[in-house]
Image (cartoon, rainbow, N blue to C red):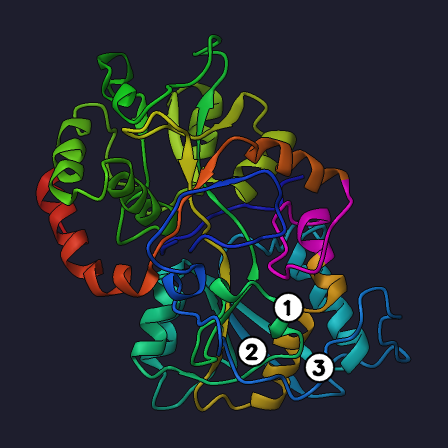
Amino acid sequence: MSQVLTRRLGAAFAVGGLALTGLTACSSSKSAAGAAGGSSTTAAAAASTPCPALGAAAPTAAPKADGSGGQVTIYSADGLYDSKDDNNWYNQEFKKFTALTGIHVNYSEDGSGGVETKVDSEKSNPKADVLVTLPPFIQKAEASGLLQAYSPTCVDKVDPSLVDRAGQWEAVMGDYLSFIYNTKAMPDGPPKTWNDLLDPKFAKKLQYSTPGVAGDGTGVMIAAIQAFGGDRNAAWDYFKKLQSNNVGPSKSTGALESKVNTGDLWVANGDVQMNYVDSTTQYPNNKIFFPAGNDGKPSTFSLPYMAGLVKGAPNAANGKKLIDFLLSEGAQLDASKVAYGFPTRTDVKPTDSNYAALTALMQGVTVFPVDWNEVAQNYNSDVKAWDTATGTPS
């Protein structure tokens, strides 16, 4: 059963310790914390409640009637919830949260950009308490004054590069940009480099979701800039050449998976959490790969789900409790066990088979740092330049 039905109509996050081992990190003139908007000295204000020691008994309470503790509303980028399949992260954690607190969770999802836009449209009369989305949309929400500072319990255990120095967001689920290929169409393996994707054999057999619309698609744009040494003009020239192979715009990354599985596409973009679980459940012909840039090394970057407390949240106290819960030891261990994702707390070390498989998948892959503040600053001009290069209407 799939834990991911649709995916990310909205964006991509920085290098960090998502409790993985054996990864090769690129050097950077900036610290990991600084690169992501965090700070090595002041990632966020100290949490008001001490983080429970690892292995401590989880808090328990007699099961409470749904809603007896009030309500909390979360707007989230898609990928972690499935109305038809209970075996996924949000479904599992929301049930545990309600049983513990009595607080009923109202859930609304869209793409990464869609949920940020919805919060923005309601800023004069906020309906959401918690926003969960991907960079650079979480940074956009912060810049637009849509979030308020909150330092969750256990936030000091989250990799500092995944925590806002102003305390307005933190990562709750780790993930990485990836690509997939059809193993039947390419039994000898996937393309090795970005330039290999220009081969005429991929004409109308390749598709990537649209930057500026889809989160993972925005990630493709960011990764290409990195692959060509940070030379944006080289990246735009590359995308212009790639158009002869590209099927066309796609607002949904998840929709591309089934097309690769059937062979309608040979190559598409995605992310590890989504692609891995779906290749093991419903798309057996799909396999993950990471193309290499000019340095010849396969690479990717971290793009986690980020949580923030909405400014003017009608149920702010309950929103804080929900964020605390998603960073609890149990929820973080479930990140891999249930969702095929990665914990963002560096002290949580999963031992489940999913985590072992994911770690093996990432061996030898360079994880490069991304300065998301810089991405946010260049976002509009980069998307416009991509539009111009590809002839895609904004």
- Amino acid identity at mark 2: Thr
* Distance from Cα at disc 1 to Cα at disc 2: 25 Å
Residue interval drawn in magenta: 333-352
The foreground one among 336 and 52 is: 52
Quadrant placement of the N terminus:
top right
Residue at the image position 49 percent from the left and 69 percent from the top: 163
Query: Residue 182 appears at what percent x and percent y?
Result: 46, 19
Query: Residue 142 appears at what percent x and percent y?
Result: 36, 77
Q: Name the residue that disc number 2 marks.
A: 73
Few, some or many residues within 10 Å of mark 1 (<14, 14–19, 20+): some
Query: Residue 162 appears at what percent x and percent y?
Result: 49, 64
Q: Name the residue that disc number 3 marks.
A: 103
**Sequence-wise first label, 2 or 3:** 2
Please indicate whether residue 118 sits to the left or right of residue 70 in the image. Answer: left
In the structure shown, which secondary structural element does the residue marked by tag 1 occupy? Answer: helix
- Please tell me whether residue 17 belongs to the stretch shown in magenta: no
Few, some or many residues within 10 Å of mark 2 (<14, 14–19, 20+): many
Q: Name the residue that disc number 1 marks.
A: 157
In the structure shown, which secondary structural element does the residue marked by tag 2 occupy? Answer: strand
Give the label, 3 or 1, closer to the camera: 1
Residue 196 in which image quadrant:
top left
In the structure shown, which secondary structural element does the residue marked by tag 3 occupy? Answer: loop
What secondary structure do most residues of the magenta stretch adopt? Answer: loop
Q: How many marks?
A: 3
Residue at the image position 8 percent from the left and 45 percent from the top: 388
**Sequence-wise first label, 3 or 1:** 3
- In the picture, the disc for residue 114 is none
**Sequence-wise first label, 1 or 2:** 2
Please indicate whether residue 200 sits to the left or right of residue 390 in the image. Answer: right
